[in-house]
Amino acid sequence: MELQVFERKKATTHRKAFEELSKFCSVVDRRIVDEGDVITARGVTSSIDLGLYICEKLAGRKVMEEIREQMDYSFSPELL
């Protein structure tokens, strides 16, 4: 199986899948990896962070903060 979308990219996934993903790209142990046209998250809770990250990227920090507050969720972009 080929995943050309990952060619010459860095990505992350759940730690148990690092070995499998490493067949297709450089695996990075981070919550979110943004490679421009490909953004990956490490696990279930990282997916919440990913959603907020994409909201900020598309709609700005203020909108992301409003969503985060409605969710009552602590999000620290500096941890990414």
Image (spheres, grey):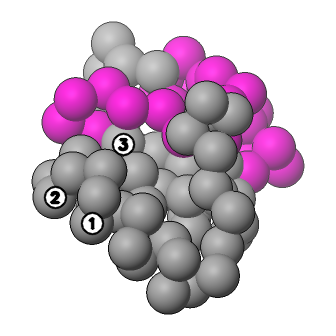
Q: Residue furthest right?
A: 16
Q: Residue furthest bottom?
A: 70
* Residue 16 shown left or right of residue 6 in the figure: right
Residue 72 placement (x, y as % from top left): 64, 82
Considering only vertical position in the picture, is 69 above or below 35?
below
Q: Is residue 12 visible?
A: no
Return the residue at label 2.
Answer: 59
Residue 24 placement (x, y as % from top left): 47, 28
Quarter of the image for residue 30 reads top right
Return the residue at label 3.
Answer: 39
Asked whether the beta carbons under mark 1 and mark 2 sit within 8 Å of each other, the answer is yes
Instruction: Give SS at disc 2.
Output: helix
Considering only vertical position in the picture, is 61 above or below 9?
below
Instruction: Give SS at disc 3.
Output: strand
* Residue 67 shown left or right of residue 77 in the figure: left
Instruction: Give SS at disc 1.
Output: helix
Q: Magenta residues, as a range?
A: 11-38
Alpha carbons under labels 1 and 3: distance apart: 20 Å
Residue 16 placement (x, y as % from top left): 83, 49
Among numbered discs 2 and 3, the one appearing first in the sequence: 3
Front-most of residues 60 and 15 = 60
Q: Amino acid at mark 2?
A: Ala
Residue 71 placement (x, y as % from top left): 56, 85
Return the residue at label 1.
Answer: 63
